[in-house]
Amino acid sequence: ALVFGDKADDDLEMTMVCHRPEGLDQLEALTNFNKRELQVLYRGFKNECPSGVVNEDTFKQIYSKFFPHGDASQYAHYLFNAFDTGNSGSIKFEDFVTALSILLKGTVTEKLQWTFNLYDINRDGYINKEEMTDIVRAIYDMMGKYTYPVLKTDTPKQHVDAFFQKMDKNRDGVVTLDEFLLSCQEDENIMRSLQLFENVM
């Protein structure tokens, strides 16, 4: 078995039933995590997913534990797809730490690019108003009535209309990555909202 670090270090073995992750040095080079952080993350990942891979149902179950007052299933579906960059239907440890590295330790631009990909549900390189509405509605559902007791059903649509109008610079009905980056970096309100949403990632 491949062992991370020092054998005395809790003897963290990487014997996997279905999937054996990349070597620690390789993951350290690919992410912004050091070896110790990777070991802790791997231990937690293996604890939740002994097979070394997570399917969407398991991901939804794990994610929903963090949002007991709302319905996280739809947002977890979009998040799962953003983590599953290879469209394999499962998330490996490498997928998990690569995304986490961007979200927790990436530059502002890297975080915004990742967020753009999350919102670009059909992966055509653009965000349309329907995609943005679907994600925002999923976030509101997940946060639950307990968190936002005064929300009306049309609030996500109003939120999206305001964002979309600011972001769609050339008024062609879609937001490109460049428009998204520019809008977020020049408008503190959008940036604040994204940072608020960052807490749910």
Image (cartoon, rainbow, N blue to C red):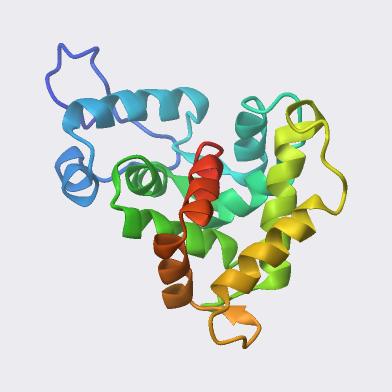
Using residue 46 as the reference point, say whether residue 164 is left or right of it: right
Q: Quadrant of residue 196?
A: top right
Residue beneath the point at 53% across and 81% down = 169
Using residue 98 as the reference point, say whether residue 152 is left or right of it: right
Q: Is residue 73 among the parts visible in the rendering?
A: yes
**15 is higher (above) or lower (below) than 105:** above
Residue beneath the point at 21% across and 32% down = 2
**177 is higher (above) or lower (below) than 68:** below
Residue beneath the point at 23% across and 37% down = 33
Q: Position of residue 189 (x, y in %)?
A: 52, 52
Q: Nearer the viewer, residue 90 or 37?
A: 37
Q: Quadrant of residue 165?
A: bottom right
Residue beneath the point at 51% across and 26% down = 48
Q: Nearer the viewer, residue 187 or 129?
A: 187
Using residue 175 as the reference point, say whether residue 17 is left or right of it: left
Check the picture and name the quadrant holding the N terminus: top left
Q: Position of residue 137 (x, y in %)?
A: 75, 51
Q: Nearer the viewer, residue 32 or 22?
A: 32
Q: Position of residue 35 (x, y in %)?
A: 18, 31
- Furthest residue to the left? 6
Q: Position of residue 171 (x, y in %)?
A: 62, 86
Using residue 182 as the reference point, say whether residue 31 is left or right of it: left
**116 is higher (above) or lower (below) than 151:** below
